[in-house]
Structures are given as structure tokens and as C-alpha cells.
Image (cartoon, rainbow, N blue to C red):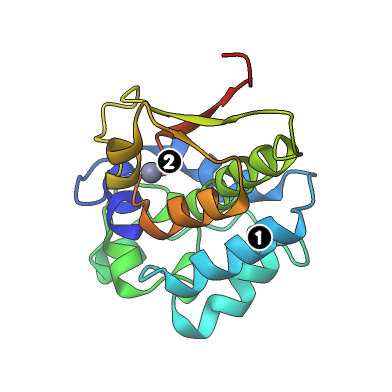
Amino acid sequence: MFGKIAKALGFGQQGASDKDQNVTSASTDAVQPSAYEERQIIELVNSSPYIRPDARAQVIDHLMRRIRLFDEDAFLTLEQKREMGLNTRQKIHSALPKLLSEEGMKCGRPSGVIGYIALAARMNASKHDSIIKISQPGLVAGVKIVACDCTGETPCAWAQRNAGKVLPATEETEAQRLRECDCSPYCMGYYEPVFPED
Ligand SMILES: [Zn+2]
């Protein structure tokens, strides 16, 4: 999934602005992640090439609201950014070099990396929860897959292959999507309930 997360973040492009800093702090809102979302966080952090292996546990703790990594208002100076070969126009929190790999620091928007992992985990949890809620026997005949191109990105192979099809409203349908989806920052395939009389 991270190839496309990188793309959506604008990695490779230069010149992202200070507003990206908001993405870093997106994970500090008050909502505690569900157990499923926590598993998603662990999986996404552990598979991300942008997080330093020795910082994974800390990033996971931050995203699970056990610790706060960006409380201090401390940012890299112009000189530090120059020394590290980073984009000097970006505001970069001074905690990030200890958390992100070189690849993460050199991507287009290092400040967005951790927030986008939180967003992807939240969206996966939301899709999982919705399919579980409607999976009670007799409630729906299945879920129709809608592939959205609203972000201008090409939907994943799963969404393209299944667009318009009605799949069973089961956890396995969602597990299959997770295995195949490489959309970013979240899947552009959606579930639409299909009722028995439709
Ligand atoms: Zn997808």
C-alpha cells in the first residue's frame, strides 16, 4: 500500500507547505482507536519503509494515544535542514529525524507520513466496521462495489476488478480488499448495501 501512499502524499515533489504539519498532529485527536484499528496501525507502521525500524514501537504508541510525540513546539532550523539535505522551505518537527527513515525524511512531505498512516488505519477500520454491521443474516443481499475516481487517482486492482459486482457482506470480502488494495491514502473502492428486494 505504501507505494501509492507515497504518491498521494506528493512524495517526490518538492515544495510542500507548512499546512502539512497538521497531518503530523492528526493522530492526537481524542478518539481512541478500536482494537481493529490498532491492529491496522501496527501492520501499517511495521510495513512502512518511511518509519525507522527502531522507532516503530514509539510511533505505534503515539498513534494509539499512549504517548505524544509532537507536544513540544520544536522545529529543525534552516541550517539543520540544509545539513540533512532536506527541503528548507518545509517546517519539519525536530522529533521527525529520530522517527523517520532516510527515505521518509527525503520524501516530499515528511511531516505527513505519520498522520497518513493514522488516516489509512482509520479508513480501513471504518470499512471493516461497516461491513460487519450490515453482515447480519437477512439484512442485505450483499454489497455492491463502487470504484470512485474522485481523487483523480486510479482505484486499486481490487476496486477495478469488482466494480459493479455484488459481493457477500462478509469479513472475508473486506479481508480480500485489504490483501489487494494499494490505493492511497485510503481505498477508492466503496461498499454499497444491496437489499434482498433490489
Ligand atoms: Zn483500494
Question: How far across and down, in percent of the image, does residue 183 sit?
Answer: 35, 45
Looking at numbered disc 2 in the image, what kind of residue is underneath it? Cys
One can see residue 115 in this view: no
Q: Quadrant of residue 17?
A: top left
Q: Is residue 80 left or right of residue 191?
A: left
Q: Does the residue tagged 2 have its C-beta within 8 Å of any atom of ligand 1?
A: yes
Identify the residue position indicated by label 2 in the image. 187
In the image, 172 versus 88, the foreground residue is: 172
Q: Residues within 10 Å of mark 1 (few under 14, many from 20)?
A: many
Q: Residue furthest top?
A: 198
Residue 63: give its label. Answer: 1
In the image, 110 versus 162, the foreground residue is: 162
Q: Quadrant of residue 84?
A: bottom left
In the image, 111 versus 2, the foreground residue is: 2
Looking at numbered disc 1 in the image, what kind of residue is underneath it? Leu
Residue at position x 53%, y 49% from top? 174
